Amino acid sequence: MFGFVSNRRNRTDGDSRPILGIDASRANCSRRTGIEWYAYHVIERLKGIVPTDVRVVLYSREPLVEGLELLPPNWESRVLLWPPGRLWTQLRLSWEMLVSPPDVLYVPAHVLPPVRPRRSVTTLHDVAFVTVPDAYSWYGRAFLILFTRLAVRWADALVTVSEFSKSEIVRLFRADPSKVTVAPLACDPETFRSDLDPAETSRRLACLGIRPPYFLFVGRLERKKNLSLLLEAFSSVRGKLDCRLVLAGKRGRGFEDESAALDMRWSDEVVELGYVDPHDLPYLYAGAEALVFPSRYEGFGIPILESFASGTPVVTLRSTSIPEVAGEAAIYAESATAEALAKSMLAVRNDGELRRRLVSAGLERVRQFSWDKTSLGVWRSIKPFLRH
């Protein structure tokens, strides 16, 4: 299997502190979604966790932005320019690892460079590309399978986001279970809150062209999210209730059939917003009847926690990692059918006592998760490999 470990030591400043390198390329962007937010929050929290007797280098394609550039004294930024754009990790980051390797490299998003330092740690978020192949292009699937196999082989430790994902990584890629740490994800309690001003919520919704009542879906619009089931369930709900369905997320692979149905049947009742500004997203949750999240595969499912924190009930399925995240604070459809999903949606809308219980349980459930806990789990996976 290809790959090369660089043992070169290039210390000319007399500083003997160990160096932790972190790939900040995914965190360093202005339009973050799931993995980008993960990388951002972990790096931000590590700034307060990593002790000053460790040097930290953030590697990125461009100068750091959006708060990442505010670094503690023992941290530095290294911009690795790469005009071709593609294969930055495989070529440009590999070159940096060859000529000036840190003691440990941490990659928050799956793919380790073929040339790497003596010790490396990476986060594998899920393996949906194996179990839900129709949600990926052949190229994307082949790329992820290859580099996941390499990560399992090369990394000294692996981090993942749920017990479900750990079991899948061990089962499908024969990872050593003792090497895999589970560090569950979280949401930002300062952003997603249940006490947002109702007048401001109404104003934001009006600006987005949304008229309540509405059910909400948040996430990439792709086949593995089970959007055809959601649309079929909404069709049933719409026959009994004057409401709308709001889809918040970029289009992904496999949404072509669903989008055709939207154009033909749901031009007025379904609002497709595309990527939603992070400043507007909390208000979308706050104004919704419920988050409806019928995904057939999730490594974790952050929108569930965001909805809980916003005081909005969650309607979902007992599939993959979702019960780990939602616990008993969500309402689960009795089966993965449109009829069962619609029944749960109507129950949340029509049963005030059920709704109050779900809101209370959700607010309690979300307190069990924090980005501090996530980042501490990452740090505990890295720390044993940093030697003074």
Image (cartoon, helix red, strand yellow):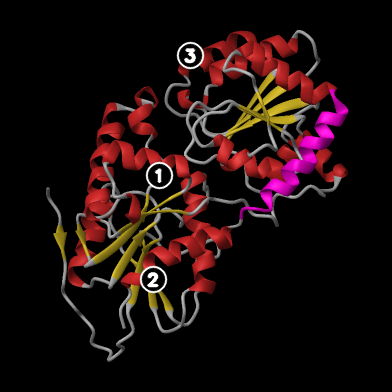
Q: Which residue is tagged 1?
A: 166
The amino acid pointed to by label 1 is Lys
The question of residue 355 being in magenta is answered with yes
Look at the image and give the residue range highlighted in magenta: 351-369
Q: Nearer the viewer, residue 127 or 84?
A: 127
Q: Pointer 1: residues within 10 angstroms few (<14), some, or many (20+)?
A: many
Q: Which residue is tagged 3?
A: 257
The question of residue 137 being in magenta is answered with no
Q: Pointer 3: residues within 10 angstroms few (<14), some, or many (20+)?
A: few
Q: N-terminal of the two: label 2 or label 3?
A: 3
Q: Which residue is tagged 2?
A: 383
Q: Residue furthest bottom?
A: 14
Query: Which quadrant would the C terminus be assigned to in this image?
Result: bottom left
Main SS class of the magenta portion in the image? helix
Q: What is the spatial separation of the Cα atoms under label 2 and label 3, in whole angstroms? A: 47 Å
Judge left or right: residue 186 versus residue 3. Answer: right
Question: Where 128 sits versus 37, above or below?
Answer: above
Residue 232 in view (yes/no): no
- Circle 2: element type: helix
The amino acid pointed to by label 2 is Lys
The amino acid pointed to by label 3 is Asp
